[in-house]
């Protein structure tokens, strides 16, 4: 099968982890036949580094008008790279940017797209993908009904990133016709120096069981001790205890960290939709029948106010 | 300011999902169908915009006969007109076909804004909005949680990891709406009664020149329930919470190797 083109996302020149995962998966699927398309402004130095993850060629669109994301600008660059590389498939990391760009590019190419894929295999010359549907209550195995190229976005933190140690040839994408109507004027930092839940490897989330906004301090302490991010259920967000950017679930963020701790969260299906693909799930809840225990790998039945503080102490002891 | 709101009808988010006899679709018995929750933000925003600036809200859906209920719900909440493209039996529809159908349905209509939900709950693709924008050749902003609409432009906030993009766009434009944008209203009894008398424009999908079978770019091979999870290690911590905490941290370190 012909190769795979991977859209690689950067912010301020830093390549996103989820994009490295996508290149690595492309490399596992297509061996040497992987190209990347890398878009931004003043990012030339970082481009060659993509070879280390398995890209043989990097199509570089480096233009001051591409400093900030726009579907129209970035999509034009991806479409040009597709023209040059004629790939069998185009991969995106399923980040905020990738989930916006992949469908737009697909429509521009006159083809469909498979979103939020968690496993991939080949069947002849097409990919067959597994993706959660109905908020993770079911999994669909899907293909693109023969349409080409196959546009696929991969759920972050599900596929492993691995260095292969290769080097890449960098090809400049010239002659882009940039007609950007929806313009990103600014990227406000709303993170306040905290790790975003969507990118964290460890997440500690609190729910209505916390009883009040001040008790998120407990969650924050445990998250800090573990080097993780703070998450929340919708009940806690709707009560105004914590900002929506922390919300995990169907109407919040979908996360797949290596460790997810849910304290005072019942485990409603809409919450599970956002975190059930976490590798290890821990529940702390005083109700032994709380649904969260059904998907927990580990749990404590108990009062979180009695359990979380000693957990913080124990974790701190590990760090020495 | 005329707004088009694209809505889809989905199983209630609390539904128990069972696999249907063909192994590719859900068993629809007993499913309660609702307007996809993200579409409610789109509708609410359109209603607020037209209340402030005048103009009409047209709700559009593509789906089988039962989807008319979603349009009636939109009309009851205040939408002025409704368009029902009849087709799309598959519960896990093809985003690209849906976008093509909606693009045809929009053809010849006058609009300043097209508002969609961020994703159709259930299919969970989040693709129709950006695809539709590309097909009708208007700019779009996806995942919008903040919006100000001027006379011929808009400014929107869109949440990304760790930040918010501030986007400006001329009109007409398409938006996909996310939680945080507004608080959707409920239909009042008066609205529900009035909705019964509002006309719904019905179009058979075949008359739009789209063949659902041959145009599809999404083939569901099989649908399965998630594999059952093996039972976790649950520690009773009521009597000795500190001991339970120590045991848990030890397991996370030495057994799960997660910390
Ligand atoms: C369309 C739609 C979308 C939604 N999207 C989301 C979403 O994105 N994310 C989300 O989270 N929810 C979402 N929800 C809401 C969801 O249905 C639940 O209402 C919500 O997740 C409940 O939050 P909770 O678990 O914090 O609260 P509750 O369900 O009230 O649970 C609180 C838990 O805390 C436990 N508890 C109380 N006190 C203590 C204590 N001292 N120590 C230990 N445990 C204690 C209780 O036993 C209980 O299990 C959505 C709902 C709808 C309809």
Image (cartoon, coloured by chain):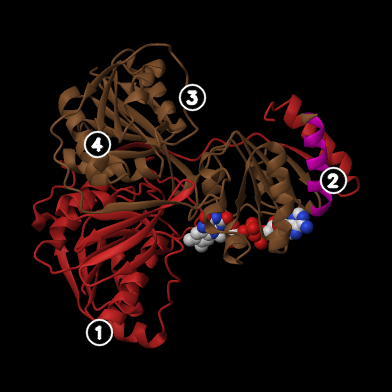
- Give the distance between the C-alpha atoms of the residues marked 2 and 3, in whole angstroms: 35 Å
Q: Which chain is red?
A: B
Residue at 31 percent of width and 26 percent of height = A44
Q: Which mark is residue B197?
A: 1
Q: Which residues are magenta?
A: A305-318
B178 horizontally vs A238: left or right: left
- Give the distance between the C-alpha atoms of the residues marked 4 and 2, in whole angstroms: 58 Å
Q: Which mark is residue A160?
A: 3
Q: Say which element carries label 1.
A: helix
Q: Which residue is mark 2?
A: B237
Q: Is mark 2 within 8 Å of ligand 1?
A: no
Image position, residue A286 (x, y; %):
78, 54
Of the residues under marks 2 and 1, which one precedes in the sequence? 1
**Is the N terminus of chain A in the top left, top right, bottom left or bottom right quadrant?**
top left
Q: Say which element carries label 3.
A: loop
Q: Which chain is brown?
A: A
- Give the distance between the C-alpha atoms of the residues marked 3 and 4, in whole angstroms: 31 Å
Ligand 1 placement by image quarter: bottom right
Q: Are marks 1 and 4 on the same chain?
A: no
Please say if the residues under marks 1 and 3 sit with CB atoms less than 8 Å apart: no
Q: Are marks 4 and 2 on the same chain?
A: no
Residue at 41 percent of width and 50 percent of height = B27
- Give the distance between the C-alpha atoms of the residues marked 2 and 1, in whole angstroms: 60 Å
> Within 10 angstroms of label 1, few (less than 14), some, or many (20 or more) residues?
few
Q: Is mark 4 within 8 Å of ligand 1?
A: no
Foreground disc of the pair 2, 1: 2
Indicate whether A58 appears above or below B259: above
Q: Say which element carries label 2.
A: loop
Which of the 4 image quadrants contains residue B48? bottom left
> Within 10 angstroms of label 3, few (less than 14), some, or many (20 or more) residues?
some
Which of the 4 image quadrants contains residue B222? top left
């Amino acid at each position: 099968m012909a190769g795979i083109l991977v859209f690689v996302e950067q912010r301020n020149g830093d390549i996103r982890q989820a994009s490295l995962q996508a290149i690595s998966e492309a490399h596992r699927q297509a061996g040497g036949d992987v190209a990347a398309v890398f878009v931004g402004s003043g990012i030339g130095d970082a481009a060659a580094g993509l070879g280390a993850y398995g890209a043989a060629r990097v199509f570089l669109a480096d233009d001051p008008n591409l400093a900030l994301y726009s579907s129209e600008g970035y999509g034009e660059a991806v479409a040009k790279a597709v023209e040059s590389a004629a790939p069998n498939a185009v991969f995106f990391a399923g980040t905020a940017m990738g989930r916006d760009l992949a469908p737009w590019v697909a429509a521009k190419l006159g083809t469909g797209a498979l979103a939020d894929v968690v496993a991939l295999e080949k069947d002849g010359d097409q990919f067959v993908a597994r993706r959660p549907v109905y908020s993770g209550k079911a999994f669909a195995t899907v293909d693109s009904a023969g349409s080409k190229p196959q546009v696929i976005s991969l759920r972050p933190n599900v596929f492993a990133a691995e260095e292969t140690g290769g080097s890449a040839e960098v090809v400049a994408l010239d002659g882009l016709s940039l007609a950007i109507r929806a313009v990103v004027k600014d990227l406000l930092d709303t993170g306040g120096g905290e790790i975003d839940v969507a990118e964290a490897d460890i997440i500690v989330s609190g729910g209505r069981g916390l009883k009040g906004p001040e008790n998120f301090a407990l969650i924050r302490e445990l998250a800090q001790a573990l080097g993780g991010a703070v998450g929340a259920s919708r009940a806690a967000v709707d009560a105004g205890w914590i900002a929506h950017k922390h919300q995990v679930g169907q109407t919040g963020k979908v996360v797949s960290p290596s460790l997810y701790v849910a304290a005072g969260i019942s485990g409603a299906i809409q919450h599970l939709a956002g975190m059930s693909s976490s590798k290890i799930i821990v529940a702390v809840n005083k109700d032994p029948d709380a649904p969260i225990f059904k998907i927990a790998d580990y749990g404590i039945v108990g009062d979180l106010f009695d359990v979380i503080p000693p957990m913080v102490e124990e974790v701190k002891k590990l760090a020495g | 300011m005329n707004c088009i709101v694209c809505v889809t009808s989905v199983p209630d988010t609390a539904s128990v999902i069972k696999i249907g006899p063909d192994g590719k679709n859900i068993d629809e018995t007993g499913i309660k169908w609702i307007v996809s929750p993200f579409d409610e933000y789109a509708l609410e925003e359109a209603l607020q915009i037209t209340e402030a600036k005048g103009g009409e809200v047209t709700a559009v859906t593509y789906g089988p006969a039962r989807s008319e209920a979603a349009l009636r719900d939109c009309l009851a909440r205040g939408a002025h007109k409704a368009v029902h493209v009849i087709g799309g039996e598959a519960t896990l529809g093809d985003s690209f076909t849906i976008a093509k159908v909606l693009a045809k349905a929009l053809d010849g209509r006058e609009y300043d804004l097209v508002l969609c939900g961020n994703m159709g709950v259930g299919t969970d693709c989040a693709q129709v909005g950006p695809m539709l924008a590309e097909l009708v050749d208007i700019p779009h902003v996806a995942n919008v949680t903040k919006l100000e609409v001027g006379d011929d432009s808009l400014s929107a906030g869109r949440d990304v990891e760790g930040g918010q993009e501030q986007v400006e766009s001329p009109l007409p434009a398409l938006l996909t709406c996310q939680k945080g944008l507004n608080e959707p209203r409920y239909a009042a009894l008066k609205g529900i009664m009035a909705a019964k008398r509002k006309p719904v424009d019905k179009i058979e999908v075949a008359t739009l020149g789209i063949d659902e079978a041959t145009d599809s770019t999404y083939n569901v091979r099989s649908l399965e329930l998630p594999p059952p999870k093996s039972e976790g290690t649950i520690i009773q911590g009521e009597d000795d919470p500190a001991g339970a905490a120590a045991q848990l941290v030890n397991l996370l370190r030495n057994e799960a190797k997660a910390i």
